[in-house]
């Protein structure tokens, strides 16, 4: 087993532990030691603040040494004629921030947040939702993202799960009205439950396909109910382990029918949000069908769905597919498919989805160059699909991690804006292609010239002159903006 597969086995094992049934199911290999689960009499209704030690996070500027302040993210400051908060549209991922436990393939959960009571009950789900809104408010972000099964416990039947979801959504809606915060996107979790072990849309069992459809139907409805701006499909189990037992064509056809069903349902319920597909090459399956931006775009075009979907590019998924995040973003942008960014980063020495907060200013500058060229991401934004390290166990770490990720992207935005405004790099690129501004170049781009005519040109011109790619100069220019 590759380390990547091993790691996630236990990660999902833990989640299955808490989510498969309504209450906590004891799979002792995956559970927290009882001593680590802080109870503190909190089975009662939670009273007071969840984060009493944390102030509302404010902008203090680059010279500030306060870990609970922004140094670069100044929400209302304008960059290139638009407020920073409108370029960035930050969102917190409920699953990492409120369901992340620190469990790994070799170890039990490490986090024992004071508001948790160690159960996956409905009352716990409601209390956790209140904590979520206090967190979002103190951080000063306008959006959150969720899977159906993170926010409400799975029931014994589909209808029971739906009823649990409705109860939590009713509370979330009330809290949204009080705060003005709403979902950047919602999604259906079609990867944790054992029924989805062969996939949802690509399961060989029609019963499972139907179950997945019913779950997506409900998740789309609650996303709509909460005013979500997008709906995401991440096909963690839509893929295969071996082609020897797989009808590849059938599975791809089924995946297309499933997505068409979602398009139809979106129209039926009047949901105007964007449908997004989040590419990832593998993990948990050996091969996921939405491998990368180019593969996913090709699939959507092949099935006539390209006009109905955009892409949610996750930086760590990009590196897993052997590309840079910048590459995936640029492919999505030039194909007119860039819809959202799952802002995280991987580890250069680790081969799986480590989901770390982005802290590399150079990387953030590249990301923001694409976002600016794209004219922004709205109705998408930046969702922090990122989690604390297993060893980070203080409540304030949740804030520090997000502040650091937000500041990194804000700094990237400032750098990218200057870089593009000054135009030095743009000029360098334009110069490389300037021969294509000639008459023949224009004819080639318009498809108006034959190979024979080009052959005649070569006879006239002789051997091409070698011109420098100027890579070192491009790198020098780029780095001078960081
Ligand atoms: C997992 C994915 C997942 C999606 C939402 O690797 O990033 O978290 O963003 O299902
Ligand atoms: Ni993601
Ligand atoms: Ni991921």
Image (cartoon, rainbow, N blue to C red):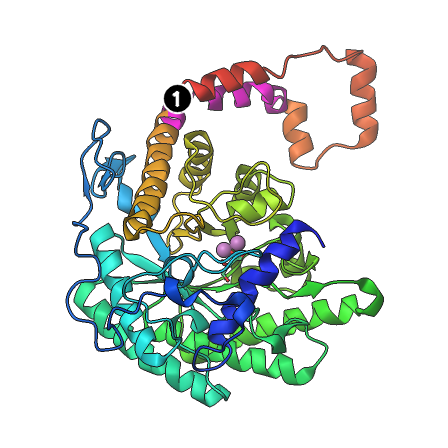
| Residue 440 position by quadrant | top right
Q: Is residue 97 magenta?
A: no
Residue 193: where, in percent of width, then height? Answer: 57, 75
Q: Is mark 1 within 8 Å of ligand 2?
A: no
Question: Residue 141: percent from the left, percent from the top?
Answer: 27, 53
Q: Position of residue 189 (x, y in %)?
A: 51, 70
Q: Is residue 412 left or right of residue 202?
A: left
User: Which structural element holds mark 1?
Assistant: loop
Quarter in which the C terminus is drawn: top left
> Left or right of 115: which side holds 452?
right
At horizontal 24% and vertical 29% (from top left) the residue drawn is 62
Q: Is residue 224 above or below residue 87?
A: below
Q: Is residue 427 on the magenta stretch? A: yes
Dominant secondary structure (helix, strand or loop) of the stretch shown in magenta:
helix
Q: Is residue 227 visible?
A: yes
Q: Quadrant of the N terminus?
A: bottom right
In the rendered structure, which segment of residues is drawn in magenta?
419-438
Residue at (78% x, 19% y) in the render: 457
Question: Picture quarter containing residue 224?
Answer: bottom left
Quarter of the figure with residue 414: top left
């Amino acid at each position: 087993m590759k380390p990547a597969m091993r790691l996630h086995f236990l990660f999902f094992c833990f989640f299955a532990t808490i989510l498969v049934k309504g209450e906590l199911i004891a799979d002792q290999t995956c559970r927290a030691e009882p001593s680590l689960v802080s109870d503190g009499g909190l089975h009662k209704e939670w009273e007071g603040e969840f984060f009493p030690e944390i102030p509302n996070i404010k902008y203090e500027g680059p010279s500030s040494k306060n870990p609970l302040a922004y140094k670069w993210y100044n929400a209302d400051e304008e960059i290139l004629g638009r407020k920073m908060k409108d370029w960035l549209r930050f969102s917190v991922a409920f699953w990492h921030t409120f369901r992340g436990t620190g469990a790994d393939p070799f170890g039990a959960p490490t986090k024992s947040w004071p508001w948790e009571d160690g159960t996956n009950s409905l009352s716990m789900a409601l209390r956790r939702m209140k904590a979520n809104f206090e967190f979002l408010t103190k951080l000063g972000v306008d959006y959150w993202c969720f899977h159906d099964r993170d926010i409400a416990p799975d029931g014994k039947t589909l209808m029971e799960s739906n009823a649990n979801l409705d109860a939590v959504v009713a509370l979330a809606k009330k809290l949204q009205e009080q705060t003005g915060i709403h979902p950047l996107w919602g999604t259906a979790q079609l990867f944790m439950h054992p029924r989805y072990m062969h996939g949802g849309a690509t399961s060989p069992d029609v019963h499972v396909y139907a179950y997945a459809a019913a779950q997506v139907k409900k998740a789309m409805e609650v996303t709509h109910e909460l005013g979500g701006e997008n709906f995401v499909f991440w096909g963690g189990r839509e893929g295969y382990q071996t082609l020897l037992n797989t009808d590849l064509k059938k599975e791809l056809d089924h995946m297309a029918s499933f997505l068409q069903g979602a398009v139809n349902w979106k129209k039926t319920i009047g949901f105007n949000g964007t449908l997004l597909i989040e590419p990832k090459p593998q993990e948990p399956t050996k091969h996921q069908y939405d491998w990368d931006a180019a593969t996913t775009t090709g699939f959507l075009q092949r099935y006539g769905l390209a006009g109905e979907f955009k892409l949610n590019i996750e930086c760590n998924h990009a590196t897993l597919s052997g590309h840079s995040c910048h590459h995936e973003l640029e492919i999505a942008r030039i194909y007119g498919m860039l819809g959202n960014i799952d802002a995280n980063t991987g580890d250069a020495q680790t081969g799986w989805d480590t989901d770390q907060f982005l802290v590399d200013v150079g990387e953030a500058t590249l990301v923001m160059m694409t976002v600016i060229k794209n004219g922004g991401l709205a109705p998408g934004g930046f969702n922090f699909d990122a989690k604390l390290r297993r060893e980070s166990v203080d409540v304030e770490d949740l804030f520090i991690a997000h502040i650091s990720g937000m500041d990194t992207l804000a700094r990237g935005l400032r750098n990218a804006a200057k870089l593009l405004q000054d135009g030095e790099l743009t000029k360098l690129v334009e110069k490389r292609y300037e021969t294509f501004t000639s008459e023949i170049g224009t004819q080639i781009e318009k498809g108006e010239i034959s190979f024979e005519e080009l052959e005649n040109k070569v006879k006239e011109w002789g051997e091409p002159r070698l011109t420098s790619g100027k890579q070192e100069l491009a790198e020098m220019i780029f780095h001078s903006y960081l």
